[in-house]
């Protein structure tokens, strides 16, 4: 099951998930589900938390979570929580902070975090923190990059990063970079490509990724390719495998490498979502990369994933996906029928020139890392990383300054910076939804609507930009006319935003909408209150708007989240002279 996740997630990052027959994959996955609700590594094997998350992640890749009985899976996971808040991996009782992450990540994807005691889970994870800032597998255990990812990821998903000493942990993580540019998992160990994910994602989540040399890391990953047959190994000249190919590609995705989809640093899902920027203090590299030359190697990665599809996911993948023999449910049989097969076109080069270079179609089904995190144009990020455009770095920094000023309540100042970014690098305009929000709060509604329409043209599944375009146009033309002009977008996987979209598009009762999510996850309650208030504002009902938006500000998520929209709720109150305390 884990092998399926690695291979399929890599295909998705490369834009070639359709290389496999999704129906066959899903059929095999569902055959691995146990009566308990958990999933096994293969048909007939025992269920475990690790395989359960991989199964849910693969179903999420194919947008097929609807085939699950989510409550049944959630009940299996919640049944593994111990009294101290920790989790066992399976019925045999082994406890590890990794299992805490698996449980929280899986339930987050399924929107079932309410099934566990989140407060106890968070407190247990916090108890695994060490004096060096890192985290171990249990309280007092040695700090390790893999455990750190699990603990930081779980804390990020639950909105509990205040338990992390970001500077201390950031120092420990950045010390993992060695002379070659690669990252190791502990002091005095060799670098390994897989830590391009474990370390880098953690640095992104605590906002300290600028403390390492991203250019050297990218070169290390690319040097681990098999340039003849494709694929990525743990270190240069070693044999490639699916595991390191996935984490190498995932690491490059986190580095905003051209041609790859974005990946969420906490949920490890290569969905079309935004991720935190990795360019806090970008500097020009001494040697400029040649993207064309690098893309030649990337095409070989595509060749390897073709091999993954035809080898690892089929004939030789039986070493990973054996079907059970009749004598024992634990015995691996290597001469069995295939769990699923590739489509006939899988031998083509997957990393082709037809894959879009833009890696963010800002749709986000995940509750913590919303699309409201900073993501400038990929071409601008690439130029800033490589020094290919002297203005690109300044444009990125201008956007950063603008976002900071907006969070501080200086809306006009934020607009100055956003406009400066566009002047420096015109490519940024198509992605500057932050500018549209600022324009709304200085009553420049026509320009705001134009900004959101430009953004939706680039990101056709963006529910929130569609709503904000409506809000601008409702101020200009009234609600009825704005509804006629409503920008229809793709289906948002988040229930709260699907309902918000329908309410703004077709009309509805904002009070009932907010009440429907009053007992939901923290972020759902926040978003329901925020958008109920905004709906009231569009209807010229300021008092009702105030009640809902102040409630959003006072919600736990609104008070402690770093989400840009949590800051927006406070700015909204400031601009309307409402007290949000």
Image (cartoon, grey):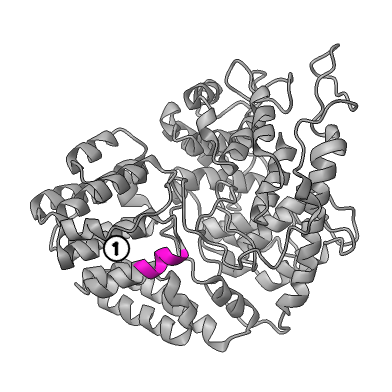
Which sits in the foreground, 82 or 90? Answer: 90
The answer to whether one can see residue 199 in this image is yes
Residue 571 % position (x, y) = 24, 63
On screen, residue 221 versus residue 133, left or right, reads right
Q: Main secondary structure of the magenta part?
A: helix
Q: Secondary structure at mark 1?
A: helix
User: What's the magenta region?
Assistant: 453-458
Vertical order, 177 against 3 (above or below): below
User: Is the residue 390 above or below the residue 245 in the image?
Assistant: below
Q: Which residue is mark 1?
A: 469
Q: Position of residue 420 (x, y in %)?
A: 39, 84
Task: Pick whichever, 199 or 499, lies toward us.
Answer: 499
Residue 457 on the magenta segment: yes
Does residue 258 sit above or below 38 in this rendering? Answer: below
Quadrant of residue 461 within the rendered picture = bottom left
Q: Quadrant of residue 33?
A: top right
């Amino acid at each position: 099951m884990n092998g399926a996740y690695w291979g399929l997630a890599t295909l998705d990052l490369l834009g070639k998930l359709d290389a496999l027959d999704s129906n066959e994959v899903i059929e095999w996955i569902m055959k691995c589900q146990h009566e308990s609700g958990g999933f096994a590594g293969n048909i007939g094997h025992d269920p475990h938390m690790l395989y359960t998350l991989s199964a849910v992640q693969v179903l999420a890749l194919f947008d097929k979570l609807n085939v699950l009985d989510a409550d049944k899976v959630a009940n299996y996971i919640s049944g593994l929580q111990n009294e101290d808040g920790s989790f066992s991996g399976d019925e045999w009782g082994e406890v590890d902070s990794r299992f805490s992450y698996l449980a929280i990540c899986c339930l987050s994807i399924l929107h079932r975090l309410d099934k566990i005691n989140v407060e106890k889970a968070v407190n247990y994870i916090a108890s695994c923190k060490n004096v060096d800032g890192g985290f171990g597998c249990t309280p007092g255990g040695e700090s390790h990059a893999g455990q750190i990812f699990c603990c930081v990821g779980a804390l990020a998903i639950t909105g509990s990063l205040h338990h992390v000493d970001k500077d201390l942990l950031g120092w420990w993580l950045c010390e993992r970079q060695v002379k070659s540019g690669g990252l190791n998992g502990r002091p005095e160990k060799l670098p390994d490509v897989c830590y391009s994910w474990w370390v880098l994602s953690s640095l992104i989540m605590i906002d300290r990724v600028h403390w390492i040399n991203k250019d050297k890391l990218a070169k290390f990953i690319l040097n681990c390719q098999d340039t003849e047959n494709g694929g990525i190994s743990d270190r240069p000249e070693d044999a490639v495998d699916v595991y390191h190919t996935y984490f190498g590609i995932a690491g490059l995705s986190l580095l905003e490498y051209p041609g790859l989809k974005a990946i969420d640093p906490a949920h490890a899902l290569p969905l079309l979502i935004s991720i935190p920027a990795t360019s806090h203090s970008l500097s020009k590299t001494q040697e400029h990369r040649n993207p064309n030359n690098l893309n030649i190697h990337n095409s070989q990665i595509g060749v390897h994933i073709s091999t993954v599809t035809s080898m690892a996911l089929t004939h030789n993948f039986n070493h990973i996906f054996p079907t059970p023999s009749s004598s024992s449910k634990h015995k691996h049989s290597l001469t069995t029928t295939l769990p699923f097969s590739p489509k006939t076109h899988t031998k083509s080069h997957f990393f082709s020139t037809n894959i879009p270079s833009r890696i963010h179609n800002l749709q986000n089904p995940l509750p913590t890392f919303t699309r409201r995190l900073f993501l400038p144009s990929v071409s601008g990020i690439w130029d800033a990383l490589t020094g290919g455009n002297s203005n690109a770095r300044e444009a990125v920094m201008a956007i950063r300054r603008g976002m900071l000023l907006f969070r501080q309540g200086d809306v006009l100042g934020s607009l100055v910076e956003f406009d400066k970014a566009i002047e420096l690098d015109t490519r940024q305009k198509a992605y500057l939804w932050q500018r549209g929000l600022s324009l709304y709060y200085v009553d420049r509604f026509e320009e705001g609507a134009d900004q959101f329409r430009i953004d939706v043209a680039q990101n056709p599944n963006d529910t929130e930009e569609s709503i904000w375009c409506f809000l601008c146009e409702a101020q200009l033309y009234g609600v009825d006319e704005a509804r006629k002009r409503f920008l229809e977008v793709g289906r948002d996987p988040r229930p709260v935003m699907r309902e918000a979209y329908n309410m703004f598009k077709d009309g509805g009762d904002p009070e009932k909408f907010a009440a429907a999510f009053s007992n939901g996850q923290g972020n759902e309650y926040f978003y329901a209150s925020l958008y109920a208030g905004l709906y009231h504002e569009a209807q010229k009902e300021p008092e009702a708007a105030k009640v809902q938006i102040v409630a959003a500000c006072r919600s736990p998520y609104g008070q402690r989240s770093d989400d840009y929209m949590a800051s927006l709720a406070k700015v909204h109150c400031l601009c309307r002279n409402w007290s949000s305390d």
